[in-house]
Image (tube, rainbow, N blue to C red):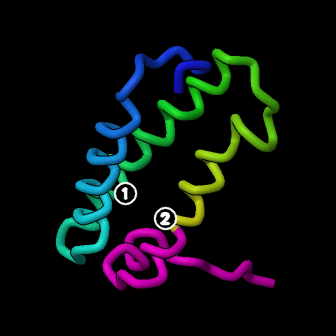
Amino acid sequence: MLELGYRAGIGFWIGVLETLILALYLVPSTAVLGAVLFMGVFGDAIASHLRHGDPVLSHDLFGVYLGVIMWAGLWLRDPALRAVFPVRRART
C-alpha cells in the first residue's frame, strides 16, 4: 500500500469497508447498491494503479474484470435485473 501512495494501516480500513459492501451485495434486496459501491472501490483501485504506472492488462484493468464478473453474477441471480437488461437475439 505504501508503494501506491497510501499511508500505513489504511489497508485494514479498506478491508473493513469492502466487507461491509460485500454484506450489502450478498443480501438480495440491497445487492444492486452493493454492486454500485463495489464499482467505486474498483474505480479507485484502477486509478491507483494508473497513477503508479502498473501494467494495463494485469493491474489497471483488473477492477474492470472484477466488475464484469460481479455484474454478470448479479444479472444471473436477479430476474428483475434481467428484465431491465435482457439478452436479445438478432433477428434474421
Chain-order first, disc 2 or disc 1: 1
Measuring from the top left, give residue 86's x and y in whole percent: 50, 76
Q: Residue at x 24, y 77 (%)?
A: 28
| Vertical placement of residue 77 versus 47, above or below | below
Q: What kind of residue is marked 2?
A: Trp
**Residue 51 falls in which quadrant of the image?**
top right
Tell me where the magenta segment starts and ends, as one range: 72-92
40 or 22, which lies in front? 22
Measuring from the top left, give residue 84's x and y in whole percent: 39, 70
Q: Residue at x 81, y 31 (%)?
A: 55
Measuring from the top left, give residue 26's x and y in whole percent: 29, 73
Q: Secondary structure at mark 2?
A: helix
| Vertical placement of residue 40 versus 83, above or below | above
The answer to whether residue 31 is left or right of residue 82 is left
- Circle 1 sits on which residue? 35
CB atoms at circles 2 and 1 under 8 Å apart? yes
- Circle 2 sits on which residue? 71
The answer to whether residue 83 is magenta is yes
Q: Quadrant of the C terminus?
A: bottom right
The answer to whether residue 84 is magenta is yes
Q: CA distance from mark 2 to mark 1?
A: 7 Å
